[in-house]
Amino acid sequence: MKATQRLHELGQSLWLDNITRVMLTDGTLRRYIAEFSVTGLTSNPTIFDHAIKNGSSYDSAIRQKTAQGKSGEGLFFDLALEDLTQAADLFRPVHDRTGGVDGWVSLEVSPLLANDTASTIAAGAQLHARADRANLFIKIPGTPEGIPAIEASILAGVPINVTLLFSAEQYLAAAEAYMRGIERRLAAGLNPRVDSVASLFVSRWDVAVQSVVPQELRNRLGIAVAKRAYKAYRGLLASPRWRRLAAAGARTQRLLWASTGTKDPAASDTLYIETLAAPDTINTIPDRTLLAFAEHGQLRDVMPVDGGDAEDTLAAFRRKGVDDAALATQLQREGTVSFDKSWQDLLDCIASKSATLEQGASTRAGQR
């Protein structure tokens, strides 16, 4: 049995952290679903930027939409929705078979709205309506400005993937927003079942401290933070407040491990898959990590519900001068800036590609 299938049977979903038009048309995504137990995927601006910049599969669509007068964000969301609705349809059998627990795809609102709560709410609702797919999440960052947008979106019935979470405290803030949204739906006589996941970024912790900690602590901080968050997650699910919501029909906001590709070339290429195995969670992984884990990954220990050695490990980092609370805030702030840059890079890529294709079309027309 493949390691990916063993994770699936443990109760952890494997979602692909990638999407391209090529993998939709050449059967790659279908193969991942059939062979590697992949049951969902996520997208972000960097993924689309690379796919558009490094290939020609989007050229025809960009040329056509440019001729129609579309540009910038409008053109991008047209492309993204075309891809993600196709992917959502591929995962729809999984979604139906699991009663909506699994089989999701995700689309991010413009990162430029990260500090604009009202616009984030409006954009998320509009994108979800345009997609017209029951198994499409809208990604909203779990920043202080994003928290009220998450609550309002859940109240409005929009499924949300909370992104850019870096600590147990940030996760719990997102979970609180989710529960408040559900509670407000119940108070209004609405169906409490609105799905959500909360995405905790892992490997960026280890990248941030790699140069300031000794060898024995390298690649251990992200895992310790994840263990602490998993303990908080399990504690929340056992709380009277959540049990009341679950009894009323609410669905668990599953914890999702994000940024789980190994960044340190000296570390195992399956490090964050093997150490983050936990029931009722999701791990989103890039293609190369998926293929590596399917080939030689090992499923060993399951993450302890009590956090295991997380606090001892975090204390060891603090003795080396690493303030995990301050670093969590810094990483979320840097993540917001990075998302903004990726978004601008994507829009620049689309503008450049549009201009090149338009120029080529004009040249060919002049040669006739």
Image: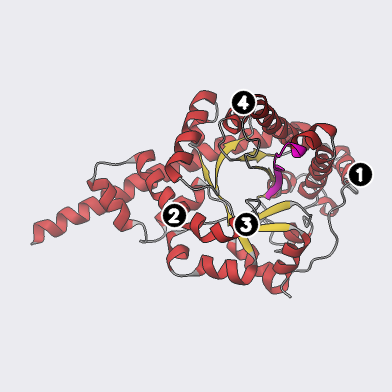
As measured in the structure, the alpha-carbon distance from the residue carrying label 2 to the one carrying label 3 is 16 Å
Q: Are marks 2 and 1 in contact (CB under 8 Å)?
A: no
Q: Which tag, 2 or 3, sits closer to the chain's start?
A: 3
Q: Nearer the viewer, residue 290 or 206?
A: 290
Q: Which tag, 1 or 3, sits closer to the chain's start?
A: 3
Residue 215: quadrant of the picture:
bottom right
Which residue is labeled 3 in the image?
15
Q: Are marks 3 and 4 in contact (CB under 8 Å)?
A: no
Which residue is labeled 1 in the image?
312
Which amino acid, by three-letter code, is at mark 3? Trp
Provide the secondary structure element on which disc 2 rests.
helix
As measured in the structure, the alpha-carbon distance from the residue carrying label 3 to the one carrying label 4 is 27 Å
Provide the secondary structure element on which disc 1 rests.
helix
Which residue is labeled 4 in the image?
148
Q: Residues within 10 Å of mark 4 (few under 14, many from 20)?
A: many
Is 212 within the magenta?
A: no
Which amino acid, by three-letter code, is at mark 2? Asp
Q: Residues within 10 Å of mark 2 (few under 14, many from 20)?
A: some
**Residue 93 left/right relative to 3:** left
The residues colored magenta run 246-257
Residue 9: quadrant of the picture:
bottom right
Q: Residue at x 84, y 35 (%)?
A: 239
As measured in the structure, the alpha-carbon distance from the residue carrying label 2 to the one carrying label 1 is 44 Å
The mark found on residue 83 in the picture is: 2
Is 254 within the magenta?
A: yes
Residue 114 on image: x %, y %: 54, 30
Q: Which tag, 1 or 4, sits closer to the chain's start?
A: 4
Which amino acid, by three-letter code, is at mark 1? Asp
Please identify, in this view, whether the residue under mark 2 or under mark 1 is nearer the observer: 2
Q: Which tag, 3 or 4, sits closer to the chain's start?
A: 3
As measured in the structure, the alpha-carbon distance from the residue carrying label 1 to the one carrying label 4 is 34 Å
Provide the secondary structure element on which disc 4 rests.
helix
